[in-house]
Amino acid sequence: MADDNNTPKQAATPAKSKTSPGEFIRQVRTETSKVVWPTREETVRTAIFVFILVVILSLFFLGVDSAFGAIVRWLLGLL
């Protein structure tokens, strides 16, 4: 007779109870208190860094776009 050792076992999972709105707010406050917020100096430094990268990348893509545009104009001029 076949052995039933290959059948998957049902994991005992506890029934989930609904969280009350008050308990949810307490959990949110607890988790929010664990967050390490950046200082004003860190925020300003990061914003300046992002601004500089945006300027550099926009100039790069302007150059790439201009180069491709010139190549396409040259190829179309051959026709």
Image (cartoon, helix red, strand yellow):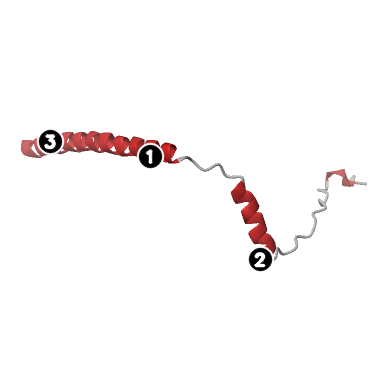
Circles 2 and 1, Cβ within 8 Å, touching? The answer is: no
Task: Between residue 71 and residue 49, name the one nearer to us.
Answer: 49
Identify the residue position indicated by label 2 in the image.
21
Examine the rendered structure and indicate whether residue 4 appears above or below residue 14.
above
72 vs 58, left or right, is: left
**Mark 2, secondary structure of its residue:** helix
Q: Residues within 10 Å of mark 1 (few under 14, many from 20)?
A: few
Identify the residue position indicated by label 1 in the image.
44
Identify the residue position indicated by label 3 in the image.
70
Residue 79 at what x, y percent from top left? 7, 39
Identify which amino acid the numbered label 1 is placed on: Val
At x 30%, y 35%, the residue is 52
Q: Residues within 10 Å of mark 2 (few under 14, many from 20)?
A: few
Identify which amino acid the numbered label 3 is placed on: Ala
Identify which amino acid the numbered label 2 is placed on: Pro
Task: Between residue 19 and residue 33, name the one nearer to us.
Answer: 33
At x 43%, y 41%, the residue is 40
Circles 3 and 1, Cβ within 8 Å, touching? The answer is: no
Residue 59 at what x, y percent from top left? 22, 35
At x 47%, y 40%, the residue is 39
- Considering only order in the chain, which callout, 3 or 2, is on the residue closer to the N terminus? 2
**Mark 1, secondary structure of its residue:** helix
